[in-house]
Amino acid sequence: DSGVTQTPKHLITATGQRVTLRCSPRSGDLSVYWYQQSLDQGLQFLIQYYNGEERAKGNILERFSAQQFPDLHSELNLSSLELGDSALYFCASSTRWDTSKLFFGSGTQLSVL
Amino acid sequence: KNQVEQSPQSLIILEGKNCTLQCNYTVSPFSNLRWYKQDTGRGPVSLTIMTFSENTKSNGRYTATLDADTKQSSLHITASQLSDSASYICVVSPNSGGSYIPTFGRGTSLIVHP
């Protein structure tokens, strides 16, 4: 168990809808990362937060947004969903913002029908 | 553009056999390279980390090598077990310009048959 909690585990929704994925980092970790993993694709970096502030941005669509709250949990909001957004979304956390050792949650499997 | 290429894409071996997975990268300047193991339906877990000055590092039956000159790494698995069936991901981190976001390869899917 990595200590990173993601909810829900599975999410099935329709095109055009909006969903929120939730992540609780390991106790003491200040940095949270969001990754998208599509079928046969590597993990694509979306966004990183550190202690409540956005630290780095990757290939995140404008329809997607995220935030990190004062208690350090994070949410990833996906709106106007398309079929191509179906993927496994991972949250990871780390103690520092400049480390490569990430602790991953078990992911949220999003299916857009 | 920072890239990490892994080969083979997939590999099937018999239990007890050895195998070697390859990773080539163009991430520069280089900070470190990690190998992660991702079981099906789970998040990746770090196996090893290698910095510029390290050539070889072992973690049980896993041995990683790094050639920073040719920008290549390998992960050797000895005496494979059924539980080694997973995706093995090479992850390379830069060290400059304020960007420390690691770049993930697509992984090598390893299946170990009894």
Image (tube, coloured by chain):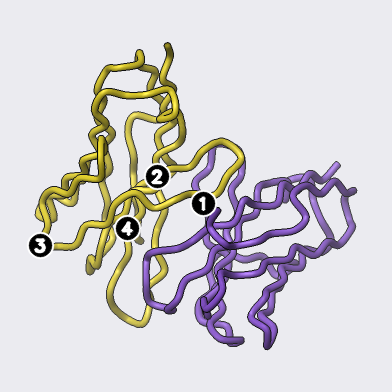
**What residue does disc 4 label?**
B92
Name the chain letter of the residue that bears numbered label 4: B
Residue A43, label in figure: 1
Name the chain letter of the residue that bears numbered label 1: A
Residue A42 in the image, given as x and y percentages of width and height: 49, 46
Sequence-wise first label, 4 or 3: 3
Q: Residue at x 39, y 64 (%)?
A: A101
Numbered disc in front, either 1 or 2: 2
**What residue does disc 2 label?**
B89
Numbered disc in front, either 4 or 3: 3
Q: Left or right: where does residue A65 sit relative to residue A28?
A: right
Mark 1 secondary-structure assignment: loop
Mark 3 secondary-structure assignment: loop
Are the numbered discs 3 and 1 placed on the same chain, yes or no? no
Are the numbered discs 3 and 2 placed on the same chain, yes or no? yes
> Residues at badges 1 and 2 in contact (C-beta under 8 Å)?
yes
Sequence-wise first label, 3 or 2: 3
Q: Amino acid at mark 2?
A: Ile
Which chain wears purple? A
Q: CA distance from mark 1 to mark 2?
A: 9 Å
